[in-house]
Image: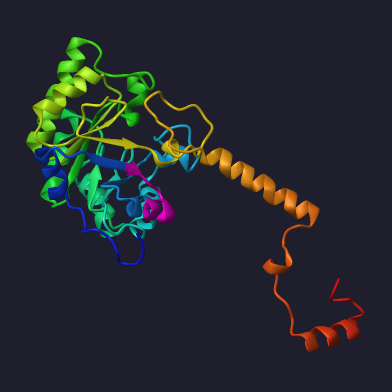
């Protein structure tokens, strides 16, 4: 697609009706203008400016160090590349934990300053009060349960959640409570396939899976992971659709080689003076301007 040839703007109503229509929802993370624009032009339904940017863009060890200002900065950039997709901003750690007032203020920044159309918030029943306040401020909310990266210290690392009966039923209950509160969709991360099937069947809103199997109403992957932007270890649920890390490394290697050999830049990649100007300068400074 190019120019103004974009499909109609996707709204939360479009996303919620997808489930009734039996249509899958596609979601990808993006953290800047070019990646958001590419994803949008490819026809993605939802672009999530995830706090995963801390690890894949900023080089942090986990998502806990990501600040609101960093999230706003990257969401602003992504919003400039989005024409059709629904843009969701990810509430970072400690942006919704201290007070209702601060939670609403931070969610409002995503919409007012950064151009997001919804926010995502991690956690189940413990977050109901905060989610209610955000919704009261007329800001749509996407939920997120299961493996919630902001809780890695409590979880003891990046572990699959809901593998014992008590925890599985707790996740089912959390999903139902979040739906009752009014969220428009929910991310299920790092939970067994069978559990995500039950949760998906219990909810009227779409479930978006990441490491949660095939039964979800949609799927999300990190932009850099699915495009092979890194050669680092990736979880088993990531499918790499390209090897950009290898391609870019090879391209830069060829660039270095061409510089060293003098093959870059070529005559076609250089600018020339008018012939008379070149001649006068050559005569004055004693430098031949032609090989």
Return the x and y of residue 62 as percentages of the image width and height. 43, 32
Q: Is residue 78 magenta?
A: no
Is residue 53 found left or right of 187 in the rendered image?
right
Residue 60 location in percent, x, y? 48, 36
Can residue 95 be seen at all in this image of the molecule?
no
Q: How was this image coloured?
A: rainbow
Q: Is residue 252 visible?
A: yes
The part of the chain drawn in magenta is 28-38
Residue farthest to the right, as pictured: 286
Q: Which quarter of the figure has residue 174?
A: top left
Q: Is residue 180 left or right of residue 249?
A: left
Image label count: 0
Place of residue 104 in the rendered image (x, y in percent of width and height, measured from the top left): 20, 48
Q: Residue at x 62, y 47 (%)?
A: 251
The residue that appears at 34% across and 31% down in the rendered structure is: 150
| Figure quadrant of residue 130 | top left
Q: Which of 281 and 264 lies nearest the eye of the viewer? A: 264
Quadrant including the N terminus: bottom left
Residue 199, above or below 24: above
The quadrant in which residue 170 appears is top left
Q: Is residue 194 left or right of residue 220?
A: left
x then y, percent, for residue 175: 15, 28
Instruction: Work out whether residue 43 or residue 194 is closer to the camera in this orientation and state it.
Output: 43
Q: Residue, x 40% and y 35% (percent of image)? A: 63
Quadrant of the snapshot with the C terminus? bottom right
Q: Nearer the viewer, residue 81 or 269?
A: 269
């Amino acid at each position: 697609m190019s120019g103004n040839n974009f499909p109609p703007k996707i709204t939360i109503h479009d996303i919620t009706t997808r489930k009734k229509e039996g249509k899958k929802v596609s979601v990808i993370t993006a953290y800047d203008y070019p990646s958001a624009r590419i994803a949008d032009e490819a026809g993605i339904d939802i672009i999530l400016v995830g706090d995963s940017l801390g690890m894949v863009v900023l080089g942090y060890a986990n998502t806990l160090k990501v600040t609101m200002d960093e999230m706003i900065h990257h969401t602003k950039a992504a919003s400039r590349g989005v024409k059709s997709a629904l843009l969701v901003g990810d509430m970072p750690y400690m942006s919704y934990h201290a007070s209702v007032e601060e939670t609403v203020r931070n969610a409002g920044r995503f919409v007012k300053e950064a151009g997001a159309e919804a926010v995502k918030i991690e956690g189940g029943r413990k977050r109901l009060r905060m989610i209610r306040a955000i919704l009261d401020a007329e800001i749509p909310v996407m939920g997120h349960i299961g493996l919630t990266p902001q809780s890695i210290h409590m979880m003891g690392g990046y572990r699959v959640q809901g593998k014992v009966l008590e925890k599985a039923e707790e996740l089912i209950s959390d999903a139902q409570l979040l739906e009752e509160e009014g969220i428009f969709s929910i991310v299920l991360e790092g939970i067994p396939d069978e559990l995500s099937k039950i949760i998906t069947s219990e909810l009227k809103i779409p479930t978006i899976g990441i490491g949660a199997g095939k039964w979800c109403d949609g799927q999300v992957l990190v932009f850099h992971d699915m495009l092979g932007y890194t050669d680092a270890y990736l979880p088993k649920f990531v499918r790499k659709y390209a090897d950009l890390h290898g391609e870019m490394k090879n391209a830069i290697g060829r660039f270095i080689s061409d510089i060293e050999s003098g093959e870059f830049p070529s005559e076609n990649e250089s600018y020339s003076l008018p012939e008379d100007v070149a001649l006068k300068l050559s005569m004055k400074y004693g430098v031949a301007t032609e090989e």
